[in-house]
Amino acid sequence: MSNINEYKDIVAFHPGYYIADIIEDMEISQAEFAVRMGTTAKTLSQLLNGQANISNDLAKKLSVMLGTSVEVWQNLQNTYDRKLIEIQQAEDVDAQADLAREIDYKYFVDVVGLPKARSINDKVANLCKFFAVSNLRNMLNPDFLVNFRASSSCNSEKNIINSRAWIQTAINVSKNIETLPYNAKKLKGYLPELRGMTVKKPEDFLPRMREIFAECGIAFVLLPHLKNSGVNGAVKWMSQDRVMLAMNNRGIYADKFWFSLFHEIKHVLQQKIKTIFVSSTVEEMIDINNSLELDADKFATNYLIPPADYKRLNPSRYTSDDEIVEFARTIGIHPGIVAGRLQHEGIIAQNRCAKLKGKYAIEIKHIV
C-alpha cells in the first residue's frame, strides 16, 4: 500500500510520507528511528507504507521526539482522511455517471425543481440527495422500494433505475400532501361519486378527487411520465394511517385513466401495508402477487361497468358508436370506458371509437 493516494487532481499524503522524509533527513535507519520513537519496527513500517494511521499515542511520541505539537500529526492524519473521502466520493460519482445518464435529469428540473446542472457530477449529487441514497446504484438493489419482478423485456438497468426514480419521486411529493387518517369505510362511501366523475373534465374532477382522497387518508399524486420508467401507477403505505396513490399522465385516455384509478383504489382497500403495488405498461412488469392484481383488475372492471349492465348491452362487433354512447349515458360513465373495454376484450377493433375514447390533457407544473 502506498503512502500517497491519487485520483485525477486529488492527492492524499499519508503522515507516513512525511515521516519517511524525516528519517532520510536524520540519516538513520528505520530500525533506529523505531527504537528512538519507542515503537516496533513493524508498526513503523506499516506507518511508512500507509497501512496504519497515527494514533494519539504515536502522535504524542512523535511530538516529543521531533519537538512539534501533537496537533501537527493529528492534523496530518485528519487531512489525509478527508482527502481519502474526497477521492472515494470522486470515484463513486464517476462510477455512477453512466447510470445517471440513463435518467432524464430535465424531468426533475421541470417537475420537482431540482437545480439545473452543468456537469454529470452535479447531476449525480443532486439526484442522490433527492432520492435520499448514498449511491444511485443502490436503487438497483432488489430490496429497494418495490416488491415486483421485472420481465425479460424490462430487465435493463435503464428501466429499473427510471422505474424506481419515478416511484421515489411520487413518494417525495406525497410527503407534502396533508391527509386525515386512513378510513376505508369513508373511501367506499365515496366510490359512487368518484365513478360519477368519469363524465367530467379533468379540470373539474381533479380538485374534488384530491379532496376526497385526502379526507380518506390517501395522498393522491399525479406525475408526468418519466421516460424509460414503464410505470403507470403505484400504491405504497407510508404508515398505518396514510397511503400514497400515484398515477402518471402518459397518454391518458378516459378508459385507461379510470380503469387504472379504480385498480389502484382496490390495492388501497386490500390494505397490504408492507407491499408496494406497481402498475406498468403491458408485459413490462409482473407483480409477485398475481391474485391481488387479478382482484384489482376485476374490481375496476366490474365497478365501472357492472356485470348485469354489461350483460344487458350484449356487445358484439356490430355494436355501433351510438349504442355505446347511449349505454354509457344510461349507466352514468364516460363512453370511452365502454369502448375501451370492448377493445380490450377484442369485441371491436382497436381503430374504432377514436372520438369516443377522450384523451385528457393534464398539464403538470412544478409540484414541490
Image: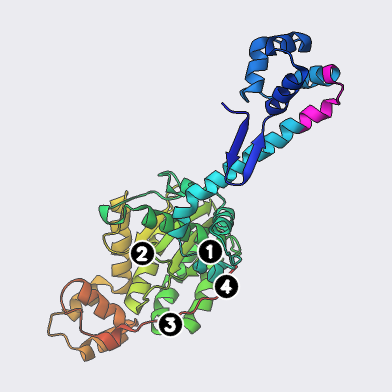
Tell me the kind of residue under disc 1. Answer: Ala
Secondary structure category for the residue under label 3: loop
Vertical order, 343 against 136 (above or below): below
Q: Which residues are magenta?
A: 65-75
Tell me the kind of residue under disc 4. Answer: His
Tell me where residue 15 appears, x and y as whole percent.
Answer: 71, 28
Between 73 and 128, which is closer to the camera in this rendering?
73
Tell which circle, 4 or 2, labels the residue nearer the N-terminal end. 2
| Among the 4 quarters of the image, the one containing residue 322 | bottom left
- Residue under label 1: 219
Instruction: Check the picture and name the quadrant holding the N terminus.
Output: top right
Tell which circle, 1 or 4, labels the residue nearer the N-terminal end. 1
- Residue under label 2: 263
Tell me where residue 184 appears, x and y as whole percent.
Answer: 47, 60
Query: Which is closer to the viewer, label 1 or label 4?
Result: 4
Is residue 50 shown left or right of residue 319? right
Is residue 80 shown left or right of residue 231? right
Tell which circle, 4 or 3, labels the residue nearer the N-terminal end. 3
Q: CA distance from mark 4 to mark 3?
A: 16 Å
Tell which circle, 2 or 1, labels the residue nearer the N-terminal end. 1
Is residue 19 shown left or right of residue 298? right
Q: CA distance from mark 1 to mark 3?
A: 22 Å
Is 68 covered by the magenta stretch?
Answer: yes
